[in-house]
Amino acid sequence: MDIRIESWLQLQEMIFADSWQHGLGRHRSNFVFRGVPRITHGLETSLQTGGFEAHERRLLTSFRKYAMRHAVHGDWVWNWLSLAKHHGLPTRLLDWTYSPYVAMHFATHKPEQFDVDGAIWCVDYRATNELLPKPMRDLLATDDANIFTTEMLNRVATTLEEFDNMSSDDFVLFFEPPSLDERIVNQFALFSLPSSATLPLDGLLQRRDNTYRRLVIPASLKWEIRDKLDQANITERVLFPGLDGLSQWLKRYFMTRT
């Protein structure tokens, strides 16, 4: 379902919609978020956009072979997959965040694309969890969890092949990677893991309308959102700690609006 945003205030309402948990007496959203600067950007993975699907296992095997042994804590395929994704290797993973403001940042961090509409994908992970194979649902129930860790994931599947063969039906699982560095922590990041390297995730969600909504960010609203995020310290300086992130933020902050 697409919702076209008309104002900053409406955006605040929509990103926190349905977050009230009556049983807890607290606001706790069941949604994860992904911001894209162009509405035409779907949910294709780097494997799919690069035509690497057939090479997935060899890419990951080679990455593990040539990376330093101490690169990850816990020699599980899911930790290696997280590390590989984090450093730019084509994988079936997609980046998501628990923070709607981080998603807003990625929808508005490229001024050269302020002439086109952007979007924020909002996915209800409790709804997508209903599509998971029973052993995975049972593990979430046993651990009283809604999102997998790599350790939990390793308890139900230790290889990509085993994971892919858990069900003949399409599904997507969300998991939190290890805290590899400050970037993972500051972006409040997690990954989506589809049930095959070729599964179009947006197609899966669109077959189940109750699993998601997409907030359309008009081009005319992007500068206002960007400036207010900068004022709230949601910038590259924070999300990409280091001199590269600092330089990206300053370059955009001091550019002249045309």
Image (cartoon, helix red, strand yellow):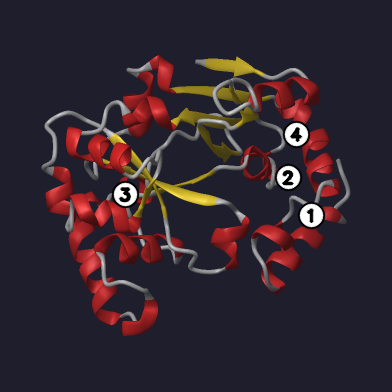
Residue ID for mark 1 = 252
> Residue 43 location in percent, x, y?
42, 36
Q: Residues within 10 Å of mark 4 (few under 14, many from 20)?
A: many
**Type of residue at label 3?**
Arg
| Percent position of residue 29, x then y | 57, 31
Q: Amino acid at mark 1?
A: Arg
Residue 207: mark: none
- Residue 27 visible here: yes
Whether pointer 3 and pointer 4 mark residues with C-beta atoms closer than 8 Å, the reply is: no
| Side (left or right) of 230 relative to 117 | right
Residue to which mark 4 is pinned: 222
Instruction: State which mark lies toward you, 4 or 2.
Output: 4
Which is in the foreground here, disc 3 or disc 4?
Answer: 3
Residue of label 3: 92
* Residue at disc 1, secondary structure: helix
Residue at screen point 27% across, 74% down: 64
Assign a secondary structure to mark 2: helix
Residue 252 position, x and y percent, is 79, 54
Residue 73 placement: quadrant: bottom left
Task: Measure the C-alpha gap from mark 4 to mark 2.
Answer: 9 Å
Q: Earlier in the sequence, mark 1 or mark 3?
A: 3
Residue 118 visible within the image: no
Vertical comparison of 214 with 67: above or below: above
Tell which circle, 4 or 2, labels the residue nearer the N-terminal end: 2
Q: Residue at x 32, y 66 (%)?
A: 80
**Above or below — where is 180 with respect to 25?**
below
Give the Cα distance between marks 4 and 1: 13 Å
Asked whether disc 4 touches disc 1, contact meaning CB atoms under 8 Å apart, the reply is no
Residue 205 against residue 198 in the figure, above or below: above
Q: Is residue 11 left or right of residue 147?
A: right
Is label 3 in contact with label 2 (beta carbons under 8 Å)? no
Q: Nearer the viewer, residue 111 or 129?
A: 129
